[in-house]
Amino acid sequence: MSSAVGTEQHPPTEPDEAPDRNRWRETFREIASGGVTVGFLAVLLAIVVGSVLIAATDEQVRATAGYIGARPGDFFQATWDAVWGAYTALFRGSVYNTNAVSFDQGIRPLTETAKFAAPLIVAGLGVGLAFRAGMFNIGGRGQMLMAGAAAGWVGYQFDLPAVLHLSLALVAAMIAGALWAGIAGLLKARTGAHEVIVTIMLNYVAFYLVFFALSKQSLLQAPNSFNPKSLPVKDSAQLPELLGDQYNLHLGFVIALVAVAFAWWLLERSSLGFRIRAVGLNPEAARAAGINVGRVYVLVMLIAGALVGLAGANQVLGTVTSGITVDLDAGIGFDAITVALLGRSRPLGILAAGILFGAFKAGGFAMQASQDIPVDIVLVVQSLIVLFLAAPPLIRTIFRLPAKEAK
């Protein structure tokens, strides 16, 4: 009897510990199979492949490869020097310049990263918002061109107080971008036209419209000029610098942060955000639940175009360009697709992805200048990130991650 009582007072510990082990195992499995982990590993794998390309294009590495059998140490040392030199140059050009003589000069690369990231973030939000509604906004270039043209026209056409002038130019850019993207949303809602085809075609239409306007002095072309360029925007319409004349960082980055907060609130806390997510998950079920799917499509594209329009305004009103040009988008309209994919169409994820790609842009020039590495290598790394993000099963297979369970 006493032994039985003792057994009841001191039960075995294995049954109690087993649920804890299973709980930790399930937690690890969920983390490992999640999108954040796959995105991080996609970036890591792209950097590894980029290292191979850096080594393959280095002259010293190729020279030592000729006698690798006799002196393999020279080959591996040259490979290490090439890769290490490239990525340390990338760090010095995008985060902190360790060779600078003062802290003010040292943090300049970080401000350059933020400057490049600003238009990528707002454009990525526009693309990501459409993704959440099950739509593909491939028209970032056209929306940026139309928005930049509107912002630039307001910027040089009027004489207004600084705050009012800048605000009016930003509003004009958002309206132009929203209306241009809204065409695709309206056509999809009314006719079922696929937004990918429509937005791609609108890119070409916007390009040739802006090019035509910049070729006519009665429209946007600067007087007495034969180049397709407008007058520079007036000082009262320019985005003010945040940290003084020694840095190029301007108010555009703050606007990008505000846009991230707005997008997060819209998707996570508003009733419209709930309808957007419902339509993105299953438009037929959303329609059966009483949601006007066509109206959601139009509203999403209007908001997405307004966000992308801020990127166009950033290019014209900021310190990157001083007026309207046909190449004001600088590839940002397409880079935003990558940013949205890497950020998993989540506002905070897009913020992080935009800063990462801003670092690539800022650091790529330092790599080319100090290490004589083609800046195209950075573009290859960005492309590889997209490739690996588009194939999550490949990432899970390479890193032996558990498969994502269907819910």
Image: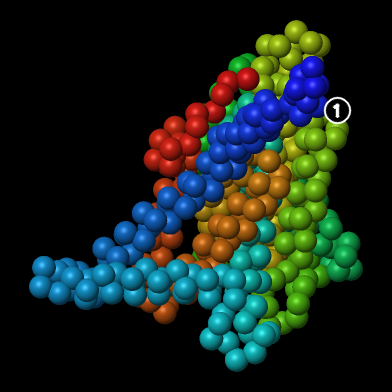
The residue that appears at 30% across and 65% down in the rendered structure is 55
Percent position (x, y) of residue 155?
75, 62
The residue that appears at 64% across and 53% down in the rendered structure is 352
List the single residue furthest toward the bottom: 101
Q: Is residue 172 left or right of residue 280?
A: right
What's the image's color scheme? rainbow
Quarter of the figure with residue 374: bottom left
Percent position (x, y) of residue 86?
41, 71
Q: Nearer the viewer, residue 215 or 92?
A: 92
Q: Nearer the viewer, residue 188 or 244?
A: 244
Looking at the rendered image, the quarter that the C terminus falls into is top right
In the rendered image, which residue does mark 1 sit on?
A: 271
Q: In the rendered structure, which amino acid carries the disc numbered 1?
A: Ser
User: Is residue 214 at least partly visible in the picture?
Assistant: no
Q: Nearer the viewer, residue 106 or 232?
A: 106
The residue that appears at 69% across and 37% down in the rendered structure is 129
Q: Residues within 10 Å of mark 1 (few under 14, many from 20)?
A: few
User: Is residue 100 at least partly visible in the picture?
Assistant: yes
Say if 7 sits above or below 46 in the image.
above
Q: Is residue 344 left or right of residue 403?
A: right
